[in-house]
Every structure is written in structure tokens, then in C-alpha cells.
Image (cartoon, rainbow, N blue to C red):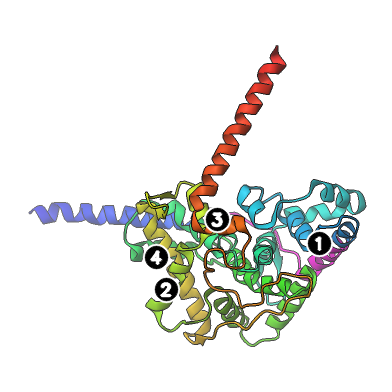
Amino acid sequence: MTRSIFSPARRFAAALLALLFALLAAGPCFARAAAPALEDTLAQVRRLEALADAWAGEHPGSDPMELTVNYLCGQRYDDPLWSLVLGGGSEAFEDYVRQNDPGLGALQSLADVTLPTGEAVDFLHLAAAAGACYGYGMPQIVCSWGGDCVQLAAPARGTSGDPAACYEALAAGFAAPDGTGYFPLSDWLADVDGVNLGQRLLAGEGLADALEGYYSLLAGTSDPDAARAEQFVALQFGGADTGDSEGFRALVWNTFSQDAGVQLYLLANEYADVDDEGRTVIAADLQAPLQAACMLVADRLADALDGRVVDPPAATPRPEDGPSASAPPAATPAPGANAPALWALVEQHPGVLLGAMGLLAAAFVAVAAALWRMGRR
């Protein structure tokens, strides 16, 4: 008798939980305007790069690539983490662009563009991911797929401690071609292609040339999705046997969870804490959704590659005046390897930078309050 009374209740509760997961996975759904073609956008990017070259020629120490990427992404990614990656934008250069080619301001709010392969990609996300790789000479996970995994997982925080259950719930919002969900296809393409494009920037290509060359090659292959996935797995994970499902999932999770940039992002958003030994500990109620998001990434790549083995990447050629490191990028760089001293410190102790940022913010508030009081006297 007890079973006959409560079984329907259990089924109803399970149905409610499934509905909740579905709503969380669906995420923001909105209509998107028709995306312009990449070739039309490239003409604007070339004009921007010409201005960046001219500006850098008159301002020693300026990097045209950093000027270009920061101009494109500065409004959308206006936060301390982005400044840490590329050093922040230049208001003087933005004024220079406004004076010489005001029409380029439309690039700063550009959404999707249509690729020669037929898909739509989030263009500014793409530029940010590529620029992050250029900035430190290594794939910056938090600026590409790592950040999107957090975005996908965060709304499901506390809903389940089982990664498999979270996987089923979040799958609908992952790489959705219609642009819905917290991790749509346009973002996925920006992440994968951004890492691949970053290597072209490191080799000395301009952004427009890198975009044109990369997508021309993809369009000429029989399977563009497999071609981009193979390069991405080599660069981001140092190669892998994508047919070993559990092993590849573990590799993706370890690469994500051990990355200093990801840890800093989690700490900054109170998704993690620092233990007594200075290690970053992910919040218990978010771990399963994050693991599920990484599982989805691994399975998407494995499906694109039909489970084949991907070899480690070859060394990336560098221009003589570019970054000096010539070794292939590692999946998860060792603390301090090929990185400035500040980034080496962040890799070892992400909480240190977070605390410093908090102190700076408190100092700024104190100074502002003092100035306000002085102004009222």
C-alpha cells in the first residue's frame, strides 16, 4: 500500500527535476539576426589592423596585434582577467580609430558571422580566444572552452551530485546549432577555432590573414569539423587517444580543473575556495556539473574525430621579433614555464591575485570616499 501511494509522488518529483534540468540547459533563447559573411568582416579588420600598425609605428612598445584584439574585445570583455591576459585596451588608440575610421566602431558590437564552412561563429569570442593564445604563447583555457564550461555548468549548481545525471541535463544546452543554451555552437566554434587561430598569430600572421587562411583550409577539407578538432586536441591536450572515452574525459577534466586561469575565474566568482595549503577547491555542489560539461567537450571532440588517436603538435614557427619560446604548447603548462613572473605566481597561488585584487578594490573605495567627503566640506 505504501508503494502504491508514494511511487507516483516519486515519479512526479523525478519529472520535476528533469524539467528543471531541461530549463537550466536551455538557457537564454533569443532570435538572432542574419549573420554577415566573414569576408565582409575581414575587410573591416584589415582597416583596423592598418590603423594599429600606423599607431604602433608612432608609439614604440605598442603591439599591433594587442591593439587590434583589445579594440575588438575591450567592450565585451571589460574585466581584470582579460586585462591580465592582454594588458588591457588603449583609450588613446580607440580615439585614434574613431578619428580616422569611425565606421569600425561597429566591430565592437559584432555578434555572429557566417563562416565559409556554413556555420555561424561568435566573432568577438573568436577574436578573444585567439588573442589569449597570442598573449602568453599558450592556450588560455579560461578565455575559450573553459570559461564556457563554467557558464554552462553554473546554473545547474546544486541540482545533482552525479556527473552522469548532469551530463544528460546539460546536453541540450551544449553546442546547440540554433544558438540556444549557455554554450551554443557559435561559442563552441569560437573556442576551438580560437585556439587554432592563436597558433597562426604566434607564427606572425595578422588577424585577418590568419582568419582567411584558416577558414579557407577548413572549407577545402572533406570534414571541417574533424580537421578543426584534430588541431585543437593536439594543441590543447598535447594529443590524445580520443577513442579511450574514460581516459580522454579524464584528460579534459584534469586540463580544465588544474588550469590556473580557470581556478582564478572560479575563485573570483565564488565557485571555489582556497584550502589551508593554498590549493583551489571547487565548490562541492558545482563539481558534478563542471565534470559533466568537460565530459560533453571530450565526447564532442571524440565524435568529430571518430575516436582516432591525435599526435602531439609540432613546434610552432615564430617570427624573429615575436615570442621567444619555440617549444610546442603544453596542455597544462608547468608553473612559471614560458610565462611572465606575475602569471607564474598566479599559476602557483591563484588566491594571491584574487586577494590583491580585493585589496585594490577596497583601497579604491576608501580613496573615493575620502575625496567625496573632502568635496562636501
SS at mark 2 in the image: helix
Above/below status of 268 relative to 262: above
At which x and y percent is residue 279? Answer: 41, 55
Closer to viewer: mark 2 or mark 1? 1
Closer to viewer: mark 3 or mark 2? 3
Q: Of label 3 and label 4, which has the lower sequence position?
A: 4
SS at mark 1 in the image: helix
Task: Tell whether position 31 is magenta.
Answer: yes
Q: Of label 3 and label 1, which has the lower sequence position?
A: 1
Residue at 75% over, 56% down: 72
Above/below status of 277 relative to 116: above
The residue tagged 1 is 64
SS at mark 3 in the image: helix
Above/below status of 240 relative to 104: below
Q: CA distance from mark 4 to mark 2?
A: 12 Å
| Residue type beneath disc 1 | Pro
Which segment is the magenta one? 27-50
The residue tagged 4 is 167
The residue tagged 3 is 345
Q: Quadrant of the N terminus?
A: bottom left
Q: Tell how many labels.
A: 4
Q: Of label 4 and label 2, which has the lower sequence position?
A: 4
* Residue 182 shows up from this direction: no
Callout 4 environment at 10 Å: few (<14), some (14 to 19), or many (20+)?
Answer: many
The residue tagged 2 is 249
| Residue type beneath disc 3 | Leu
Q: Which residue of the protein is positioned furthest toward the top in this rendering?
A: 377
Q: Could you say which quadrant of the image residue 291 lies in?
A: bottom left
